[in-house]
Image (cartoon, rainbow, N blue to C red):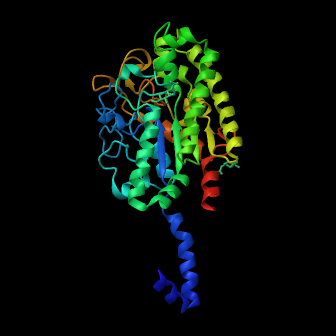
Amino acid sequence: MDKIISMANSSVLVMVLMALLGTLAPLTEARAFFVFGDSLVDSGNNNYLVTSARADSPPYGIDYPTHRATGRFSNGLNIPDIISQTIKSESTLPYLSPQLTGKKLLVGANFASAGIGILNDTGIQFLNIIRIYRQLEYFQQYQQKLTALVGAQKARGIVNQALVLITLGGNDFVNNYYLVPNSARSRQFALPNYVRYLISEYQKILMRLYKLGARRVLVTGTGPMGCVPAERAMRSRNGECAAELQQASALFNPQLVQMLQGLNKKFHADVFIAANTHEMHMDFITDPQAFGFTTSKIACCGQGPYNGLGLCTVLSNLCPNRGQYAFWDAFHPSEKANRLIVQQIMTGSTMYMNPMNLSTIMALDSRT
Ligand SMILES: *[C@@H]1O[C@H](CO)[C@@H](O)[C@H](O)[C@H]1NC(C)=O
Ligand SMILES: *[C@@H]1O[C@H](CO)[C@@H](O)[C@H](O)[C@H]1NC(C)=O
């Protein structure tokens, strides 16, 4: 280092060049990206677990670059993949992947696990899945590995400057409160009280994430749970969106935004960014043709009414053109729909992104 500086001293031009390179270098290295949550953002952790919540066999991944099932609950890319593309980074590996070592750690990591929720008792029917507190423990473990690679100070910086995505909540309704009639949670709580309980538990999770060093966190609300093909098939008479689940997201999402605003006030910074994925979905669900879809009601892969019953397997109906379907399977959007969602995350108005969209965040953070 001393040598380089003394050489630079010999020429003003070299010094200027060095200074320029110094400021440009951090910009060319993409920021790390960390992902937490459920199947909407799981990129394959469940492949390594004994669980029924998995997407590691065909036709999942049919439109993925390798045309193989990877554990993503999509015909192709999922939301984290498309965010990675947008921030000019490679996709983050699942935390449980044996390939996540050495320099790959600098890209970030995906801790998400299909089937989990805010509550520890959500998704128990899927057996061995990585519940959110365990995901946070893994995040801590990841930071130890990163520290071993680059040193404590640099590791801290990478985590503080990272982009984080967390997607939770849907399963606390569809795979818990509404899983069976008279579920334990629905006997314990009326819906409005259950939602308040979820929000207070979610707040603890986000505070823990902050404590672990996260400083820019995209928090998605629940999608329109009543409008997914599974719920249209199981809970509505004429295939309209199922009312009680729509009611649940109508209660949950605004309280989530409020809670995030409270946290930002407490931390004196815009740490938590609410992504209104409900609105983002409703745009193409309400007017699928405007977005190039032929249907937003019928899943591409599945069976029964709206292809909404059971799992998506090689035996299911499979649509020939996935780009024409808003839903890939009974619960999960198609890659095309995921692209529309990420587009709004990037450039959406404050109606979609509160207090700001990801392009504004990227511009702000590149200046600091
Ligand atoms: C869920 O489990 C974690 C530890 O695994 C615990 O810290 C947390 O308090 C539990 N949450 C509830 C609501 O019981
Ligand atoms: C992002 O959000 C800002 C503020 O709401 C808005 O002015 C801008 O048009 C949005 N899109 C982009 C690409 O910045």
Q: Nearer the viewer, residue 280 or 354?
A: 354
- Figure check: 41 above or below 306: below
The quarter holding residue 317 reads top left
**Can residue 127 be seen here?**
yes
Q: Residue at x 29, y 46 (%)?
A: 98
The quarter holding residue 127 reads top left
In the image, is 244 to the left or to the right of 53?
right
Q: Identify the image quadrant of the C terminus.
A: bottom right
- Figure check: 205 above or below 217: above
**Can residue 78 be seen here?**
no
The quarter holding residue 54 reads top left
Residue 110: horizontal and vertical position, in percent? 42, 43
In the image, is 248 to the left or to the right of 265?
left
Q: Nearer the viewer, residue 332 or 209?
A: 209
- Figure check: 190 above or below 142: above
In the image, is 266 to the left or to the right of 337?
right
Residue 122: horizontal and vertical position, in percent? 46, 22
Single out the residue that lies furthest toward the bottom.
10
Residue 139: horizontal and vertical position, in percent? 45, 44
Residue 168: horizontal and vertical position, in percent? 52, 31
Q: Residue at x 69, y 38 (%)?
A: 261
Numbered label tally: 0
Q: Residue at x 32, y 24 (%)?
A: 52
Q: Nearer the viewer, residue 226 or 62?
A: 226
